[in-house]
Image: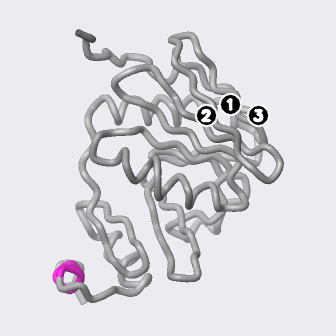
Amino acid sequence: MCYNAIMSTVRQHELISVADYLDGEEISDVKHEYVAGAVFAMAGATIAHTIIATNLTRAAGNQLSGSPCREFNSDMKVRINLARGFRFYYPDAQVVCQSNPQSERFQDSPVFIFEVLSESTRRIDEGEKRDLYLGLSSVNAYVMLEQTASTAVIYQRVGDDFERSVLDQPDSIIKLRHPDVELSFEEIYRDIRFPARH
């Protein structure tokens, strides 16, 4: 079945299999996220969004060089296995220390997950995705970054729970643990011109 036919089927409220979804993503010009058989097209990113995500991935990768952990950009999916079905999301960046085989098209055990917030994704990033990401036993931190101001909301694992913190100063540094990574706003927001505040 071609991917266009799959998308047509989805619009008729029929569910598709994980195998059809993964195969379809290989040939699709548009990324889709998968929620228990339903497929949702992702909106395109702004230039600012892409710069922030790229800066972040580069900064994390520089610090992880030589370690068993590595960074992945927004082309790599995260798979979440729930009793009510699989979900596949494309975070803007992630760090993985125990990777799936290189032939796979997704990761199951990210330690850090990053999302750059936009108006079209804020509600799901701050709600549904946050809850599901923090439910993964491998995750030690979930970081949400604003693109219109130098601000980060961080959920960092402390024992069996997560501690929420907010950084909003231009010289802020995000300090993550397990593995130890420090990401400065100077690096993350390099070349970003914030809109003027009135």
Residue located beneath label 2 in the image: 60
**Which residue: 16% across, 82% down?**
8
Relative to residue 88, is residue 52 depicted above or below? Answer: above
Please tell me which residue lies in front, 50 or 62.
50
Please tell me which residue lies in front, 124 or 112.
124
In the image, residue 39 lies at what x, y percent?
31, 73
- Whether residue 10 is in magenta: the answer is yes
**Label 1: how many residues lie within 10 Å, few (<14), some (14-19) or many (20+)?**
some
Where is residue 162, by image quadrant? top right
Indicate the secondary structure of the residue bearing disc 3: loop
Please tell me which residue lies in front, 86 or 129.
129
| Front: mark 3 or 1 | 3
> Are the two marked residues, 2 and 1, in contact with CB atoms closer than 8 angstroms?
yes
Image disc number at residue 63:
1
> Are the two marked residues, 3 and 2, in contact with CB atoms closer than 8 angstroms?
no
Image disc number at residue 180:
3
**Which residue: 44% across, 34% down?**
54
Three-letter amino acid code of the residue under disc 3: Asp
Q: Which mark sits nearer the N-terminus, 3 or 2?
A: 2
